[in-house]
Structure formats: C-alpha cells, structure tokens
C-alpha cells in the first residue's frame, strides 16, 4: 500500500486549520458584569428579577462575552469578602465590586411601563474609562410576556454592532 504525500492544497488546508485553532484558543472573551434590571415605578420587582434571568440568558448567547451576573459576584464575595470595597454597602456598590473581578464592562438596565407598552433600557459602560459605550431600548406592547420581548429586543439592539476596538481590553 502506497502512502501519498499531501498535495499543496491539502497541506494549506491543514496549516490553515492548525493556525485557526491556535488563534481561536488564544482569544479571550471580554468580561461583562450584569446588574439586575431595576424596576420602574409601575413594575413589580419580582417581574424585573425574573426578566433579569432572561437578560442573562440572552447575553450568554453572544459570542466573545464572558457574563458575570450579580449572583455570581455575591457568591464569590461570600467566599472572599476582601474583594468588596470597605466603604460600600453590598446593595449600593455593584459597579465598584465588579471592577475588582476584572470586568471590562458593566450592563445596567431598567424595566418600565407606559400604558400597555413595556420599555426595557440597557446601558453598556466601560469600567476603566467610566464612559457609556452604548445604550439601547426595546419596547413591546402587551401583557407580561411582552416585557420579555422588550428585554430581548434591547439586548439585540445593544450588541447590533461590535464594541469599538479602542475600548476592547486584554480580555476582549
């Protein structure tokens, strides 16, 4: 049985696959801390909390993002309380605490209602520069299930475009 040497085309394909695997493995995701959705005046806090889970699920589907939720941070703080800034109350210092977990960005959001219309507003903030990178809004008319659609629409709008290259840090 004769073994053939790879042709130049096959050799190029193998080389290309090897390089893409190596560079793909070396790429790190940008870490994004996600605060709970804040309910507006006419919104039940339980609904905002429930929709925070939908927000996190939608964000975890976006490639090249490592999502760090508020419960993730709270669980880590129970194991290592020194990561919490000394002068912060736990409910008031999510921004400061998330930067201790090397997050590059933070997402904050509100859920409101105007008549029958649900409005979800999200803000992506760069922690090192302390600047708003992007804001988005999602709106849907209807019952409580429309609120979920408003949140998902806001996520799609927030990441419709890639994060600007000058804001991407070493983990992006």
Image: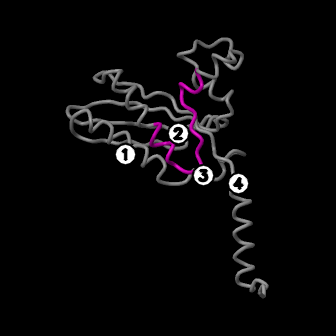
Kindly identify which residue carries mark 2. Answer: 124
Magenta segment boundaries in residue numbering: 56-74
Q: Earlier in the sequence, mark 4 or mark 1?
A: 4
Residue 71 shown in magenta: yes
Q: Between marks 2 and 1, how big is the CA–CA gap? A: 15 Å
What mark, if any, has residue 164 been given in the picture?
A: 3
Pair 3/4: label in front: 4
Cβ–Cβ under 8 Å for marks 3 and 4: no
Cβ–Cβ under 8 Å for marks 4 and 1: no
Q: Is residue 70 above or below residue 126?
A: above
Q: Between marks 4 and 2, how big is the CA–CA gap? A: 26 Å
Q: Between marks 3 and 2, how big is the CA–CA gap? A: 12 Å
Residue 19 appears left or right of 72: right
Pair 2/1: label in front: 1
The crowding category of the residue bearing disc 1, from other C-alpha atoms within 10 Å (few below 14, some 14 to 19, many at least 20), is: many
Q: Earlier in the sequence, mark 1 or mark 3?
A: 1
Q: Between marks 3 and 4, how big is the CA–CA gap? A: 22 Å
What mark, if any, has residue 153 been given in the picture?
A: 1
Q: Position of residue 70 (x, y in %)?
A: 54, 26
> Looking at the image, which residue is at 38% across and 32% down?
51
The crowding category of the residue bearing disc 3, from other C-alpha atoms within 10 Å (few below 14, some 14 to 19, many at least 20), is: few
């Amino acid at each position: 049985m004769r073994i053939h040497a790879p042709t130049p085309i096959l050799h190029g394909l193998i080389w290309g696959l090897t390089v893409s695997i190596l560079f793909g493995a070396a790429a790190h995701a940008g870490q994004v801390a996600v605060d709970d959705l804040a309910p507006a005046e006419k919104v039940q806090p339980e609904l905002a909390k429930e929709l925070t889970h939908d927000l996190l699920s939608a964000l975890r589907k976006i490639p090249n993002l490592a999502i760090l939720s508020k419960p993730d941070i709270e669980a880590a703080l129970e194991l290592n309380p020194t990561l919490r800034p000394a002068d912060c109350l736990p409910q008031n210092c999510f921004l400061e605490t998330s930067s201790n977990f090397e997050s590059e960005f933070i997402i904050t959001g509100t859920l409101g209602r105007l008549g029958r219309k649900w409005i979800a507003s999200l803000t992506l903030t760069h922690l090192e520069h302390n600047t708003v990178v992007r804001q988005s809004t999602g709106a849907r008319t209807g019952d409580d299930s429309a609120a979920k659609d408003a949140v998902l629409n806001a996520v799609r709008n927030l990441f419709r475009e890639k994060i600007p290259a000058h804001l991407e840090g070493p983990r992006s």
